[in-house]
Image: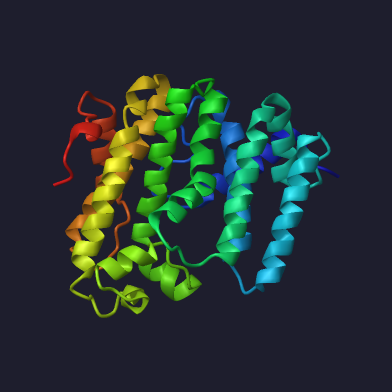
C-alpha cells in the first residue's frame, strides 16, 4: 500500500536528520513551512549523490540509475509518483511550487557529470560545475521563501559556489584517493608546480601551503561577496543562512590553520557551532567585511 504524503515527508525528514553535514539542513531554524519541502529536496539530492558516488556500481549502472531518477522525478512533477517516499513527497512539493523542477534537474546534471568528468582544466570549469551542483540549492530555498529576486539569486549563487569549493578543499585527499576525482583546476596545479599525485596527502609537498592559501582566499572572497544576503533575508531563514556562511568561514579558518596539510580534518565540532550561533544571533555577523586571519 503506498505511503501517504505525510508518511513520505516523515521518511524524508528522518533521512535528513540521519546524515552529517557541516552546514545545517532542514533544521529547526528553518520556517516550519519550509522544513518538509526542504527535507524532500535534500533526500532526493542525497539519493542521487549516493548513486553517483557510493558502492561498487559500474559507471554505466550509475548513469542508468540517474536516468531512472530523472524519469521518476518528471513523473512526480506530473502528479504521478511511484511508491518511493521521496517521490511521493516531491509530487506534493512540485504541485505547490513547480518552479523547483528545473533546479532539481540541474542537480542531476551535476551528478551525471561526477561520473564522466574527474578532472578540471581551469577554474571556469569548476564554477560551471558549481552552477549545477550547488547553486540550485540556494535558488530553491529562495523560491520556497518567496525571495527569488535577481539580486538575491546573485548573492545566493556566490554563497553556494563558495560552500561547494570549501567542500572540495576539505575533501581533496579523499576525492583523489577514494573517487579518483580532482576538483582543483589543472592549470593552477601547474602554476604551483604540483602534480596530482601530490594530492594524496602523504608527502605534504611544500607548495601545498601556498596553493591552499590561494584556494582559501578565493573561496573567502566569493563567500564574502554573497554574505549580504544573510542580512537581506529576515527571520529564521536569514538566521539559517548566516549560520551557513559563518560555517563556511569557520572551515576556511581551519583549513588555513592546517598550513597546507590536506590530510588534516577541517570538520566543525561543538565549539565551532557555539561560535557560529553566537555570531549569527547578534550584530557580530560581519563575515563579509572581515579578514580570515
User: Residue 253 location, x and y as percent?
Assistant: 22, 50
Q: Quadrant of residue 279?
A: top left
5 versus 271 height, above or below: above
Please state the total of marks drawn on the protein image.
0
Left or right, 224 with respect to 111, comes to: left
| Residue located at (16% from left, 41% from top) | 291
Quadrant of res 208: bottom left
Q: Is residue 290 left or right of residue 240?
A: left
Horizontal side of residue 271 vs 184, given as left or right: left
Residue 223 location, quadrant: top left
Tell me, what colour scheme is on the image?
Answer: rainbow
32 above or below 126? above
Residue 119, x across and y down, in percent:
47, 67
Q: x%, y% of residue 213?
A: 21, 57
Relative to 260, say whether 155 is above or below.
Answer: above
Name the residue nearer the viewer: 180 or 91: 180
**From the image, which quarter does the N terminus lie in?**
top right
The location of residue 2, given as percent across then percent down, is 83, 43
Determine if residue 230 is in view: yes
What's the residue at 54%, 39% (across, down)? 136
User: Residue at 36% of width from left, 75% of height from top?
Assistant: 196
Viewer can see residue 3:
no
Which residue is situated farthest in the left direction here? 293
Taking the view exactly as shown, the residue that stands out farthest to the right is 1
Amino acid at each position: 500500500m503506498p505511503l501517504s504524503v505525510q508518511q513520505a515527508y516523515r521518511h524524508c525528514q528522518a533521512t535528513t536528520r540521519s546524515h552529517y553535514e557541516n552546514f545545517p539542513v532542514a533544521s529547526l531554524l528553518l520556517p516550519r513551512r519550509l522544513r518538509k519541502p526542504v527535507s524532500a529536496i535534500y533526500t532526493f539530492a542525497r539519493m542521487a549523490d549516493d548513486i553517483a558516488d557510493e558502492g561498487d556500481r559500474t559507471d554505466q549502472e550509475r548513469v542508468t540509475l540517474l536516468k531512472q531518477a530523472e524519469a521518476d522525478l518528471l513523473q512526480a512533477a506530473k502528479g504521478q509518483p511511484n511508491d518511493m517516499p521521496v517521490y511521493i513527497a516531491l509530487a506534493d512539493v512540485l504541485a505547490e511550487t513547480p518552479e523547483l523542477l528545473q533546479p532539481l534537474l540541474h542537480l542531476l546534471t551535476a551528478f551525471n557529470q561526477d561520473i564522466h568528468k574527474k578532472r578540471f582544466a581551469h577554474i571556469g570549469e569548476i564554477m560551471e560545475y558549481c552552477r549545477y551542483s550547488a547553486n540550485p540549492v540556494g535558488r530553491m530555498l529562495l523560491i520556497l521563501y518567496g525571495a527569488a529576486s535577481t539580486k538575491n539569486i546573485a548573492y545566493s549563487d556566490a554563497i553556494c559556489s563558495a560552500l561547494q569549493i570549501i567542500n572540495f578543499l576539505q575533501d581533496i585527499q579523499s576525492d583523489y584517493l577514494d573517487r579518483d576525482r580532482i576538483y582543483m583546476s589543472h592549470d593552477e596545479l601547474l602554476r604551483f608546480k604540483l602534480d596530482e599525485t601530490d594530492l594524496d596527502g602523504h608527502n605534504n609537498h611544500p607548495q601545498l601551503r601556498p596553493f591552499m592559501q590561494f584556494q582559501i582566499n578565493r573561496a573567502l572572497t566569493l563567500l564574502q561577496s554573497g554574505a549580504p544576503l544573510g542580512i537581506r533575508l529576515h527571520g529564521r531563514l536569514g538566521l539559517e543562512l548566516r549560520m551557513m556562511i559563518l560555517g563556511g568561514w569557520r572551515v576556511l579558518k581551519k583549513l588555513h590553520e592546517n598550513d597546507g596539510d590536506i590530510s588534516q580534518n577541517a570538520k566543525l565540532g561543538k565549539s565551532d557551532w557555539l561560535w557560529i550561533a553566537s555570531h549569527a544571533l547578534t550584530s557580530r555577523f560581519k563575515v563579509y567585511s572581515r579578514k580570515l586571519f
